[in-house]
Amino acid sequence: MNSTQAMSGNQSDSERGDQGAAGKQKVPRRTPMACQFCRGRKLKCDGRTTCANCQRRGIACIYMPVSAQKQ
């Protein structure tokens, strides 16, 4: 009888896991790299060719990988 009780306990755990996965909220996608201006000011960069922050200020939007910046 102990083995059937353990099995029924496992089923209820997996059922709860399925409900928890369905109830999660969608996480916003992260921009892979921020432009120089946004990185320097620690602003949220939208990752477009000319990001909203640079467009609003009328400055050039330059993307450079972090590894190239340190050299």
Image: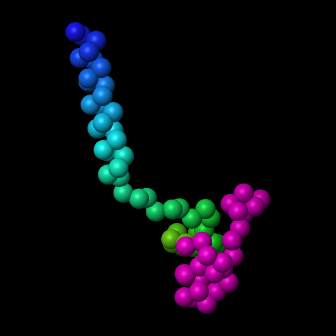
Q: Residue at x 66, y 78 (%)?
A: 49
Q: Viewed as shown, does residue 63 lie left or right of 22?
A: right
Residue 12 in view (yes/no)? yes
Coloring applied to the structure: rainbow
Give the x, y percent position of residue 2.
24, 10
Q: Viewed as shown, does residue 65 lie left or right of 32?
A: right
**Residue 37 magenta-drawn?**
no
The answer to which image quadrant residue 3 occupies is top left
Give the x, y percent position of residue 52.
55, 82
With respect to residue 39, does 18 lie above or below? above
Image quadrant holding the C terminus, namely bottom right
Instruction: Count all numbered tags in the image, as a single digit.
Output: 0
The answer to which image quadrant residue 1 occupies is top left
The answer to which image quadrant residue 48 occupies is bottom right
Q: Residue at x 61, y 62 (%)?
A: 32
Give the x, y percent position of residue 54.
59, 83
Q: Looking at the image, which is closer to me, 26 or 48?
A: 26
Q: Looking at the image, which is closer to me, 19 or 39?
A: 19
With respect to residue 21, does 69 lie above or below? below
Q: Looking at the image, which is closer to me, 40 or 49?
A: 49
**Residue 70 magenta-drawn?**
yes
Farthest-out residue, top: 1
Specify the segment rendered in magenta.
46-71
Q: Residue at x 26, y 23 (%)?
A: 8
